[in-house]
Image (cartoon, rainbow, N blue to C red):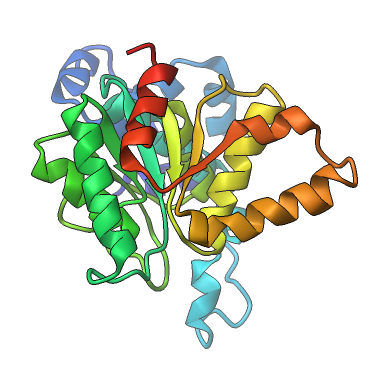
Amino acid sequence: MLFKDHFIKGQFPRVSPVIAPAIVAAGNTRLKLIILISKHSWYTNLRKAAPIQKKPIKNQENNPMEKQYVVEDIRLSESWRLFKILGEFVEGVEKLHDLGPAVSIFGSARITEDNPYYKAAVDLAGRLADNGFGVITGGGGGIMEAANRGAAGKNGRSVGLNIVLPHEQEPNPYADIKIEFDYFFVRKVMFVKYASAYVIMPGGFGTLDELFEAVTLIQTDRIKPLPVILFGTGYWSGLMEWIRQQLLENKMISPEDLDIIHMTDDPDEIVSIVKRAVGM
């Protein structure tokens, strides 16, 4: 029986202190988490609670797309889902804690290999690797693949934080550290926590999401300031002009907020900005 099934049935036993060291030595992240959980008094009380009753999602059998809404699915077995989320955090921290200085690179998964931005991402990631920076991407295709490819081609650290999606996202073969996530918000923490800078290549809604989340976290002092760099003036200048004309002129942001964002077409300038940010 899977650990998950034991937990749902209320039969999840404590881990014996005799075998605990062996489990830790084996390096199994989920088992380590079980040991940690089993030591807390609140867990003992939770085990005594009535088993969680799983309820089918309405029309799930006839509508497979219902199964993709991961956050909604938390209602099926809340306790185990919360431990699964915690498990994703633990796995991410364990695999990335000694990564060293790195740059998160974002961009569209839909860009093909013959696109100039694909080639630019390969080149930029290679330059960053040459200067001692690891490269972190979303682990998929397009710009993500290009960045991982560029770092791997220079024997740099190449990280792919893949997300399970119903379409588009397949892991690329160029990441030497691969982590798969079910939850976007856990994955986003890993992008921010281990990045010395953000480079935003051309992309769609997902790319914009990463851009504005980083800017918001910096603006509100929730994370240490880091460079957020837009690559491709032809692509991003319209957005920046809208920010100035609408957000700034209507006093929705402060003038100094614009200093968070850099925009350039020069990969050498990006490397220089990143090196300054980490004191190199």
Horizontal side of residue 110 vs 95, given as left or right:
right
Q: List x then y, in percent, for residue 220.
A: 72, 27
Q: Is residue 141 visible?
A: no
Along the line of sight, the residue nearer the viewer: 89 or 31: 89
Answer whether residue 169 is visible to the viewer in this image.
Answer: yes
127 to 93, vertically: above or below? below
Q: Nearer the viewer, residue 16 or 280?
A: 280
Query: Quick check: 81 left or right of 112?
Result: right
Could you tell me which residue is drawn at 51 percent across and 61 percent down?
235
- Please name whichever residue, 52 or 201, is drawn nearer the observer in this view of the structure: 201
Residue displayed at 47% across by 61% down: 203
In the rendered image, residue 258, in percent from the top left (x then y), is placed at 68, 36
Q: Is residue 34 above or below residue 57?
A: above
Q: Give the image location of residue 262, x and y in percent.
A: 54, 38
Q: Quadrant of the C terminus?
A: top left
Residue at point 24% right, 59% down? 119
Q: How many marks?
A: 0
Residue furthest right as drawn: 250
